[in-house]
Image (spheres, rainbow, N blue to C red):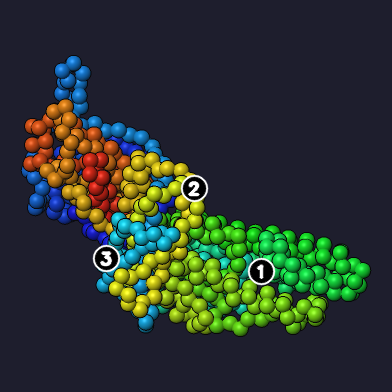
Amino acid sequence: MGISTVRRLPRTGPALPFAFLITFLGLCCVGIVVPLGAQTPPTSAPPSSASPSPNSGAAPLPAPEPQSSSAPASSPTTTPQDTKAAGEPVAEMSTHESTATFKVPVNLVLVRVVVRDGTGHAVADLKKDDFQLFDSRKPQIVTHFSVERPAAPIQPTPASKSRAEADETGKTPGPVALPSRFVALLFDDVHLSMEDLVRARLAAMRYLTSVVQPSDRVALFTVSGQDQVDFTDDHEQLGKKLAVLTPRGVTAGDATGTTGCPAMNFYQADLIVDHNDPLALAVATADALTCAFSNDTRMSNAAQSLATSTAYSMVSASNVLMDYSFRRLQEIIRRISVLPGQRSIVLVSPGFLFNGREVDVGDLIDKATRANVLINTLDARGLYTPDDGQDVSREYTSSATVAGPKSVYYLTSQNMQADILEELADGTGAVFFHDNNDLDAGFRQAAGAPEVSYLLGFSPISLKLDGRFHELKVTLATKQKYTIQARRGYYAPKHSTDPAEVAKQQIEEAVFSQEEIHDLPAELHTQFYKSDKFDAQLAVLTRVNVNRLQFRKEDGRNKNNLTIVAALFDRNGNFITGNEKTIELRLRDTTLARLEQTGMTVKSNFDVKPGAYMVRMVVRDSEASLISAENGMVDIPY
């Protein structure tokens, strides 16, 4: 059996991930004495008493005599039941088990802000009072404020590889660095040209070999969904997939608008379809008359019909590409939001127009901000020269009489297509790298995190549940000449929020963060016992100092509810399992007095394999709505 005190992980900002399901297990034991001194696993045979299963409420794992301990020498003896005047039994402590789905609350608006000086470095000494926040030009009260910095690398744990897994030289693999930072490289292979994609993937390979730290986990995703690698520290595997990346077509026709008759890009097509622009239609009609009807003016009506149908086809094809892009971003935000620690996405793309999809963009920014995910963007075109959309290798088939306005459409489109990259980066307080051919520097900046960022939260005053867009503006009260990156707005919800769902979301946010919170008096400890070479049982013990809890006096009892969550993550930060216990405390004064002296400990058991794990403990009370959270690292040897 192994006993360990918690080794704390670095702090990061709060996380707000997507809905997930936790299996709840019963309360095992209250008042377990937790030895605080680290112990060496005994060499003797395991205890004869059977170890409890993760779903049981059996007695705790037996522990060897500690060499040193700062825990109390005795545990409280509580009377499980008392009797009401009417004779109905009243439990002083009870546990309830249920399964719940957590949903994102919508009454708190979060705004991530990065303030940069004239040299581009983040400003690190700002306070809550330095910021002014406006919702549709109305000043708001900032109720949540936190300063966030990148997590320091987690110290490697001892190696947890068996001798059979030693490499060919006979050496056992080195220490395992548990993750504290996750970077998702998302290549927009449906919009990137081959030339830009090759340059970007070579820069990404150099980033993997020279910048990535042992505690970083990197994933490779593509908009098309091809050639992907989930989060890993295997850089060789990532490099192999990067080497074969290529542009992927996901539409039946030409979505770029440089071929076909008449040639037309999305910007011009959108003017025709969604804005009824007569000039845009006239230009397309003249083109159609030239390329399809040899300038026969008798076919003007047919040319206009062809131009209109081409515009609708172009809008439809572009919407398909946008759907792919937005869907992949949503999926990656959901994927990365359940990883513990700092999370960022690097979107490598030439950009694209998103006319008519502003709500989708706002929703992405909202989801990413709530999940504490930065969407960094890298314009893979670098420092480019706009062109008029014509391929010199092919015969010019457009009408010479409309060459001027047609060139304007293509130039405007190329200048505007980076707006989506700027919007996503600014909206999440991330980096927008553009107009620069040094893509190596782009990956260093975009795949990193700002030296410091600020998370502001407010509850909108007199918010109407109408789904309307609200413009946001963040300024500095001190009026320094700094550059401010912040989201530009949000959409009001269309329904109210259940307070119970808010509480569930608060717990979930804390579970998938690495921030250590100490609003409540709770400590995390771990124990493990190896039943054989391949199986072990890990116990997560949460010790609560009862004398610092707030109780509500009612019917002669001291009442409070504690929700305690223990979650287990693997070496790559993937959520393995977790359980949640809701403990109803209805304590008599005498019982409370005893617990104030001894404290109480709640234990959760997990059946695991040998290896390195990260443990997350979260405690929330019902009376003050306070939360405590701690991290632990456990390395169970083979």
Count neighbours of disc 2 (C-alpha within 10 A) and say few if under 14, some if 14 to 19, many if 20 or more: few
Q: Which residue is mark 3?
A: 129
For residue 227, say whether it is visible.
no
416 displayed left or right of 156: right
Question: Quick check: 620 above or below 184?
Answer: above
For residue 117, say whether it is visible.
yes
Q: Amino acid at mark 3?
A: Asp
Question: Quick check: 635 above or below 587?
Answer: below
Count neighbours of disc 3 (C-alpha within 10 A) and say few if under 14, some if 14 to 19, many if 20 or more: few
Count neighbours of disc 1 (C-alpha within 10 A) and say few if under 14, some if 14 to 19, many if 20 or more: many
**Element class at badge 3:** helix
Q: Which residue is mark 1?
A: 267
The reply to whether dot 2 and dot 3 touch (C-beta < 8 Å) is no
The x, y position of residue 532, in whole percent, is 30, 46
Q: Earlier in the sequence, mark 2 or mark 1?
A: 1
The reply to whether dot 2 and dot 1 touch (C-beta < 8 Å) is no
Q: CA distance from mark 3 to mark 1?
A: 43 Å
Q: CA distance from mark 2 to mark 3?
A: 31 Å
* Residue that appears at 20% across and 27% down: 91
Q: Which residue is mark 2?
A: 466
Q: Amino acid at mark 2?
A: Asp
Q: Amino acid at mark 1?
A: Tyr
